[in-house]
Amino acid sequence: MTDGPSYGFDTLQIHAGARPDPATGARQTPIYQTTAYVFRDAEHAAALFNLQEVGYIYSRLTNPTVAVLQERVATLEGGVGAVCCSSGHAAQIMALFPLMSPGRNVVVSTRLYGGTVTQFSQTIKRFGWNATFVDFDDLDAVKAAIDDDTRAVFCESIANPGGYITDLKAIAGIADGAGIPLIVDNTSATPYLCRPIEHGATLVVHSLTKYLTGNGTVTGGVVVDSGTFDWSASDRFPSLSAPEPAYHGLKFHETFGPLAFTFHGIAIGLRDLGMTLNPQAAHYTLMGIETLSLRMQRHVENAQTIANWLEGHEAVETVTYAGLASSPYNSRVAEICPKGAGGLFTVSLKGGYESCIKFVDALEIFSHVANLGDTRSLVIHSASTTHRQLTPEQQEAAGAAPNVVRISIGIEDADDLIADLDQALRKAAS
């Protein structure tokens, strides 16, 4: 569909990448639950393994159900290609893998999901990689953090847990000036609210687990390639610009052009790291994306209503929702997320840590889970769960201090959600 008329988002979220099944005419994308695929002949098999022909070899690499999902997400994000994988965390490693090598670093925002902070501050060190954490509101600090060994800049469009909105154009300008790619985690915004590539991002990653699937049934991730970065402009990215020994000296950027990163992600990333998305999960996510715009509209509408109400509650100290006029990030909504500030924010309670625990335990409609982006409203006390591994300073920087509760607003009746929050806040304050 991307080669035809310029279709709207609501049409693309249903049709992009999907065609009636050629074998049966099935209108919904089938679940191709198969490990391997029969080659036409020996010559066909050799061409596939030499990357001379595109097709299906083995489901660790490519699968027809997953391929539809990859094309759909890439289309919605405005990218040229995408690689799906087993989780959002896997997507982050997949995004960095072709760029990094021992001794290299990535400059990252301090406002990130706690698991990402741990992954970048601890786990990637085992690969010989390093991360430099910077407040991305301080553009001079971001510039100063980039050195000769920096290979990427990483941030979230709408940061988890606080709902802070990043000035993507400013950060993209810094990354572009340094000749390195900007990677944006767009999980909390989705391409319905924000398209980071339009603001200068090179790569976009998602946890499919969250809003894209939208119903708490899938663990998955995806890396979307903008196709705009010149990987051969310097010698910093040899995985993409230099001869690849495993493919007889093939140069990915020279051979595949704008799709170099995508082909590398499949031919080497999935081949060797094996972070494969299973076809049933891809099927669930495709069905979820069909209603993405409808759900996001309700998430935003509910979040705005509830954040406004919470801000005036006597038990609440602060609400971080960027859609509020009081938010320092409110001015960025119109430019970065013109359809709304999302459905995620945090609330600081006047009673501190103990009140947060009582509040979470008293809620009835809200589910206490380590997830976000569900149709159901969700809540968690980040400091004691998702951000527990971080130091107090890291928790504070990430917006997950001990007196803070993260709220993911669902698509239920807003009045019911307000009533539930009110009774829980009163119990927490008693």
Image (cartoon, helix red, strand yellow):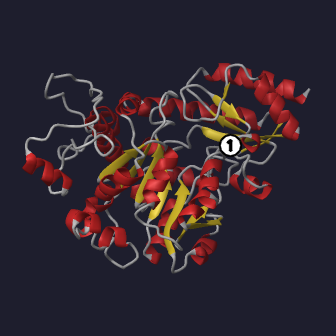
Residue 203 visible in the picture = yes
Q: Quadrant of residue 371?
A: top right
Residue on which disc 1 sits:
386
- Residue 393: horizontal and vertical position, in percent? 78, 58
SS category of the residue bearing label 1: loop
Frontmost residue, 394 versus 170:
394
Quadrant of the drawing holding the C terminus: top right
Q: How crowded is the residue under tag 1: few (<14 C-alpha within 10 Å), some, or many (20+)?
A: some
Residue 314 visible in the picture = no
Residue at 20%, 53% (x, y): give it: 49
Frontmost residue, 16 versus 97:
97
Frontmost residue, 430 versus 54:
54
Q: How many marks?
A: 1
As displayed, is residue 261 above or below residue 19?
Answer: below
Quadrant of the drawing holding the N terminus: top left
- Residue 322: horizontal and vertical position, in percent? 63, 47
- Residue 76: horizontal and vertical position, in percent? 35, 44
Disc 1 residue type?
A: Thr
Residue at 40%, 61% (x, y): give it: 202
Residue at 39%, 57% (x, y): give it: 198
